[in-house]
Amino acid sequence: MERMSFDTTSFPIEMEELVIGYRNAPPLNSPFSGRFEGAGIHLVAGRNGSGKSTLIRTLAGLQAPVSGRILWGRDDLSFVSSKERGEGMAFMASTPPRTSGLRVVEVLELMQPTIEFRDKMLQQVGAQEWLDRRLSSLSDGQAQRVMLARALLQNTPWIALDEPTAFLDAPSRTAMWKTLLELSESGVGLILASHDFGFLEGKSALSSVHAIASSGWLPLDRFGQASDWETCF
Amino acid sequence: MTAKQLCMVIGVGVFIQGALHLAWGPISIEWLNAMSSWGNPSTTDSLVLFHVRLPRVFTAMAAGSGLALSGLLLQTWFHNPLAGPSVLGISAGSSLGVAVIILTGLTWGWWGVTTAAVGGGMLTLLLILAVSRRFHGSATLLIFGLMLSYVVGALVTVLQAEAAQDALQQFVFWGMGTFGQAPLRLSLLMLLMVVIAGRMVFLKSRDLDAWTLGSITAQSMGVDEKKLKYSVIGITGVLAGSITAVCGPVAFLGLATPHLVRLISDERSHRRLIPLTILMGAFIALLADWGVRAPGIDGGGWPLNAVLSLLGGPMVVWVLLRKTWNA
């Protein structure tokens, strides 16, 4: 049944000797190990092409690693079924879908939420006005909010976000970050790849900061300054 | 108008057209006389009704619905509004299967031809799926389908050049496309197949809706990509393949019908699109068959594919233009 609050402590995510990349292309990095644990925002930084988005998709089980493995709690992710994957981690892409003709209400109903839960999440992302609009008629910023609400309705302990603000204008970006910070207080774990992390500097919601590079996985000081993080990769 | 009301309206349209098709023809029949001698081919009336007109109506309905449903499935799966069984080369693959059976003189009957057509269609679809991952942009996929059609068409021509005279004639007639070839039992079987396929696709409505949000997002929602992919291959392969075997390569119905539905209705969830598309497919097929039957009072008649291309070609151009305007 539906939980109204999140419980992220249910499983940590572990990367063991992980190499990510694509078939027929050189791997993106040397093997590395690392761990995500607990609620809040886990920031993954890195240069263009360093594999941030690839890592996010690999962690969410949407792409197979080149080698090594990922553990969701005690389960090897490569043996997790499609259904269980959908229950463990939601995912939000950097661009909202542009070709879907569905209405906002139809997108959200795919998650089969109760009306109260749906409206609560809509309010959280500030999208309650657009229920009857077509997703394709919304601006990128508005559509991303709807896609965030959809991810929230999946009611998973983890949400993976691939550069959620990449294609948004300045006001939409600020609004998205505020929403994400509020969300991180509710107990959900957000694994977030982004270039645009200035807003997170000094925020207590930040649980960990790492950079991914071809040499591997670099832990950064989460109390540090964004400009210092950038000099590390 | 709600989707339910629209379904009713199209359904009534299908029923009325079906009844008119049964009633109208170069030979006028006594309905009571025909009905009372049900299944007895000795009277002209029942012969015309049960062995000519009824199978034709059923075949048109099944072919229209089945191809339209395949078109909808392919458009959703490939995120491409211009996908369809004939555009992607699936019908061409089925034709090759049929050509191999007919032109090499194998006389395997309906079942052999159908199996070969389904096999050819599925193989083509598998080939398209294998390479489609490497394609970016919707045009590449369509051009690939077109090239595939050319290559398969060339193979068919080679087979034709080598074929015996009567086999060649049989194949050419088949290639023109018609709803008027299937016997009653086969047409009923096709209707049953479409109903079953429609039910199966309907049960996948949620997955298909999720798929419109992008394949990655859909998978993150728990959609099993492999399962959905094999359903799409299996269902479109069997539908398009067997319809091609019975009716010949039928143009445009699969591609254009889902767009016609989107034109008259603003429903986009598959729960509503699927029944609307199935009914609309039957409606359009029966409508096109007037063009084939009505001018043919003196035995002439326009080829089915000519009628469908006259209807379908402008429709595709319209979709292209509208797509450009929106972008």
Image (cartoon, coloured by chain):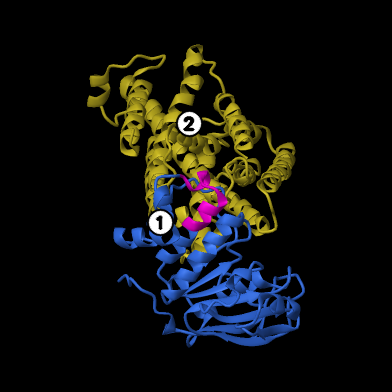
Chain colours: A blue, B yellow
- The chain under label 1 reads A
User: In the image, what residue occupies the spot 45% across and 70% down?
Assistant: A183
Q: Residue furthest top?
A: B298
Q: Residues within 10 Å of mark 1 (few under 14, many from 20)?
A: many
Q: Quadrant of the C terminus of chain A?
A: bottom right
Task: Provide the residue span drawn in magenta.
Answer: A134-146
- Residue A164 position by quadrant: bottom right
Write down the residue under mark 2. B179
Position of A223 relative to A97 (above/below): below
Hey, what amino acid is under mark 1? Leu
Q: Residues within 10 Å of mark 2 (few under 14, many from 20)?
A: many
Write down the residue under mark 1. A108
Residue A42 visible in rendering: yes
Residues flagged by tags 1 and 2 on a common chain: no
Mark 1 residue element: helix
Residue B321 magenta-highlighted: no
- Give the image location of residue A88, x and y in percent: 45, 75
Mark 2 residue element: loop
Q: Quadrant of the N terminus of chain A?
A: bottom left
Hey, what amino acid is under mark 2? Phe
